[in-house]
Image: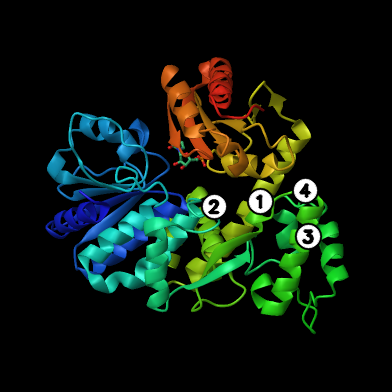
Amino acid sequence: MSLRDDAREVARVILSHHEVTVISHIDADGIAGESILAQALSRAEVPHKSVFVRQLEPLTMRQVPDDDSLKVFCDLGAGQQNLLLERGLSREEVVIIDHHVSQPCGRDYLQANSLLSGHGKLSAAGVAYLVAREMDGGNADLSRLAVVGNVGDMMAREDCGLTGPAREIAIEGAEAGWIEIVPRDLNCYGISTRPLHVCLAYNDDPYIPGISNNAGGALRFLQRLGVELQTPDKRWRVWEEFSPDEKRLVTSSLAQQLIACGEPTDRLFCESYLFPAEAERTPLRNAQEFATLLNACGRWTRPRVGGAICRGDRGEAFREAEHMLSNHRAVIRELLEYILDTGVRELSHIQYIHVGDRYPDTIVGIGAGMALSRLNMDKPILIMVVQPEDTSLTKVSMRTTERVVSRGIDLQQALTVASAEVGGAGGGHRIAAGAYIPRESEDTFVERVNQLIGEQFARPGQGHC
Ligand code: C5P
């Protein structure tokens, strides 16, 4: 069966129920996916409620209600089917909308899972959108949220744009007037809200010597080009506001800078996804920044605020989310400084740090990812933190770069194997993965991850660190 067939079957089952509970993940993809499903359910007049969880694990399974509703798992569930089985959930009361590796299970739960259908770059919100479209062809406006989920889950990162069914969804949204697709745009985060020199300085993909991690250098570089960086009333202009000629001048000069340093220029450009109906110079204006706003809500345990924004609230929920976003950034900056000041321990193939209980487990991966561009980018970074609800457990996050992934590294594989060996559980993606492990196994676990990453590097055809 194709993914579309699976989505059609899931839609049929959902519409045949008198009550639905959506259980979704707290990240941007999970929040966007939940909003797609909840809005489709409201429009179909199916009573529903939603539950958000950080991960599906024995502790959070308790949040899944023990009632007659159909349980729709979104952005989770595929990798935890045995938990559903242990909970005694029958095949009739579960559907899974996911894009994670599917766990072998004695019960054949109904899934619309992009990964099972061979689509590695379609997130859960993308699959949720396919289901919503099957529920009602009039749900095309929800394509925006699917694009936010896809971009938020880094589905556009490797190829500098969405591909396959994720791109088809973006095109559908563009044709309906909800999305503006900008080809060969600047591959830089913050094109709608950040002063251009700040935007460039924060960017490390591609890493541009003299500009990346160097706001002063970026500013001088742009001043030398003679482009107007501020408006007449002294407000910094954002990339979106630059004219096509100005954009061409900046990108060709950046390309020259890369070439002069012997670096490839292919990652300088990307396809951007803008939302023309949103207010200019707000994070709602493009898919990347919208996704960060949702992540800020979810990672600070207010996923419903993100959900309200996805449902169209531009008042109180948006103000609250903006507040969370600035707090999110401040804490991540502090964490970044903590990692750099404290220093990481380098093993042969990875580098790692333990931050104790100083930072929330939901954001350490983001901070580690940002620290990587100031550390040895060839070695994946592993960060550990005490899990607040159960201090006998350690939360682990790992991050690496596209370049290292293209050399055969798969963090998800390493963490899944190493955590299972010590009685924990892990998952995620090649470039970003996470796990929970018993606290007393930390040392063995780190050594084992180092060994597994070493084996990945050593496979025939792969480079070495
Ligand atoms: O928590 P963190 O941001 O490090 O998670 C990175 C990725 O790993 C996410 O896609 C998350 O869903 C996944 N993950 C997982 N199992 C865990 C922890 C994280 O699948 N126990």
* Label 3 to label 1: alpha-carbon separation: 16 Å
Residue 269 seen in this snapshot: yes
Q: Amino acid at mark 1?
A: Asp
Position of the C terminus, as image quadrant, is top right
Q: Is residue 73 above or below residue 286?
A: above
For this orientation, the residue located farthest to the front is 461
Left or right relative to 210: residue 299: left
Q: Secondary structure at mark 3?
A: helix
392, 194: nearer the viewer: 194
Q: Is residue 182 above or below residue 106?
A: below
- Looking at marks 2 and 4 on the same chain, the residue that comes earlier in the sequence is marked by 2
The residue tagged 3 is 256
Q: Could you tell me residue 410's position as x and y percent?
A: 50, 33
- Circles 2 and 4, Cβ within 8 Å, touching? The answer is no
Q: Is residue 187 above or below residue 30?
A: below
* Label 1 to label 2: alpha-carbon separation: 9 Å
Disc sitting over residue 157 in the figure: 2
- Looking at marks 2 and 3 on the same chain, the residue that comes earlier in the sequence is marked by 2
Q: Amino acid at mark 2?
A: Arg
Count of residue discs:
4
The residue tagged 1 is 205
For this orientation, the residue located farthest to the bottom is 232
Quadrant assignment, res 185 = bottom right
- Looking at marks 3 and 1 on the same chain, the residue that comes earlier in the sequence is marked by 1
- Looking at marks 1 and 2 on the same chain, the residue that comes earlier in the sequence is marked by 2
Q: Nearer the viewer, mark 3 or mark 1?
A: 3
Disc sitting over residue 262 in the figure: 4
* Label 3 to label 4: alpha-carbon separation: 10 Å
Left or right relative to 245: residue 130: left
